[in-house]
Image (cartoon, rainbow, N blue to C red):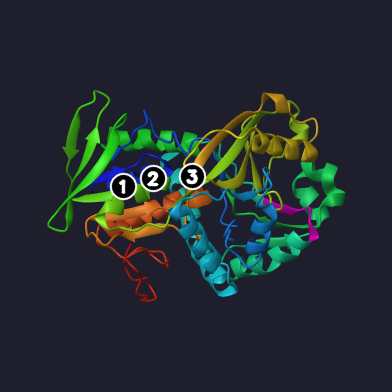
Amino acid sequence: MKAIVLGAGVTGITSAWFLKKEGFDVTVVDRQPAAGMETSFANGGQISVSHAEPWANPGAPKKVLKWLMKEDAPLLFRLRADARQWRWGMQFLRECTPEKTRHNIIQMVNLGTFSRDTLQELRAETGIEYNCLTKGILHFYTNQQEFDDALEPAEIMREFGCDRKVIDANEAVRLEPALATVKSKIAGATYTEADESGDAHVFTQNLSKLCAAKGVEFKYDTAILGLDIEGGKISGVRVRGADGQVQVLKADKYLLCMGSYSPMLVKDLGVDLLIYPAKGYSATLQIDDASKAPQVSLTDDEYKLVFSRLGDKLRIAGTAELNGYSTNLNDVRCKAITRRVMELFPGMADPEKAVYWTGLRPATPSNVPYIGVSKISNLYLNTGHGTLGWTHSCGSGRSIASIMNGKQPELDFAFTGISSKKGESLAVA
């Protein structure tokens, strides 16, 4: 059985790995010269099951209105004459009810826990290196209301297996001494010991090499032009190679892992994916004074930033800008990140030497990704992971490989186009 994976980001590469383990003959196609060169390139580095509260929650509409005209806002809607953006935004508001928020948290916790376990198994099996740290994730709050609002979601997460413990400022500083300079400002914190961090780009590239050693074929520098359909099924994918030649690649099954670009490829086929790019930013700092830099991976919930130690560097990532497909760096938003870092960890690094990056996270209004089969029986989906592509990649890759091989996934999750373990009938995209 032959499968073509469209996209070589972290979800595409993990999917290829698990498809190969299921016995498929696998080809991966990507326009970049190597794996993990777009959204997986410089993300926040967290394997964060504890980051399961969706952007769409009961407190979000008020915050979005407050942030609407702020250039450095953590979540910034730039209203455009774009029907897709408005449609996405309207569905986002519908997802902000307490009932839907709870449902979406459960989906994210189930997928995240399964994915983290799967990553740990893969690491034990292969010995893959990617600057992994298993020191947990500490969420800290310098705003009392933000901390109070976090308690109920944390309780739901604990109910469904994510041990996110509520702690005070003293315990937060004991776990991460680098927070001592802002201890008096910490209203409260939570700590999830089982969470991890690591370099998603290094992981993706190293796993692609392991895939190649197992016989997976890679077609890099290859633009995906479109999908051909015949008799109600995908009959081939049209591509243009580095030499400019157009050809049609054929397989039995096709897997869409193209992130924010997924909807455009399948729209004309009648497959409707409500994914919109959430432009995220990161800064990478060379650590000058290790005693002032965090070792535990951190989440600054008020500013929507995450911090991960990657060897002798600190990666800080976060914020979201809904403004189409531009990847131009906004200097105001970049400087807002490093300004916050210097407030928290003064003297740790030189902010003038920060390396900034931006990428387009493929966000659904609910934050729950599309994993499953589309209305076209041989076209499968593993896309729309938003900020949690790295966290969810191994679990979603393992699950979609099972689905494509005709098996029921081990995970209780709202899969697209198939029934869950609880027998829930789900919509087909």
The amino acid pointed to by label 3 is Gly
Q: Which residue is mark 2?
A: 261
Instruction: Return the x and y of residue 94 as percentages of the image width and height.
Output: 53, 68
Q: What span is in magenta?
A: 138-144
| Residue shown at the point (77%, 35%) measured from the top left | 342
What secondary structure is marked by label 2? Answer: helix
Q: Which residue is mark 3?
A: 324
- Looking at the rendering, in which quadrant would you find the C terminus? bottom left
Say whether marks 2 and 1 touch (CB < 8 Å). Answer: yes
314, 360: nearer the viewer? 360
Q: How much space separates mark 2 and mark 3, taking CA atoms? A: 11 Å
Relative height, residue 111 to residue 134 (above, below): below
In the image, which is nearer the foreground, mark 1 or mark 3? Answer: 3
Circle 1 SS class: helix
Looking at numbered disc 2 in the image, what kind of residue is underneath it? Tyr
Which numbered mark, 2 or 3, is in the foreground of this view?
3
* Number of other residues with Cα within 10 Å of mark 1, as a class: few under 14, some 14 to 19, many 20 or more: some
Residue at figure coordinates x 75%, y 65% from the top left = 148
Which residue is labeled 1 in the image?
265
On screen, 342 above or below 185?
Answer: above
Q: Left or right: where does residue 147 sit relative to residue 274?
A: right
* SS at mark 3 in the image: loop
Direction from residue 235 to residue 189 in the image, left or right: right
Q: Is residue 20 visible to the viewer in this orientation of the structure?
A: yes
**Contact, mark 2 vs mark 3 (Cβ under 8 Å):** no
Magenta stretch encompasses residue 373 = no
Rounded to the nearest angstrom, the CA distance separating label 1 from label 3 is 16 Å
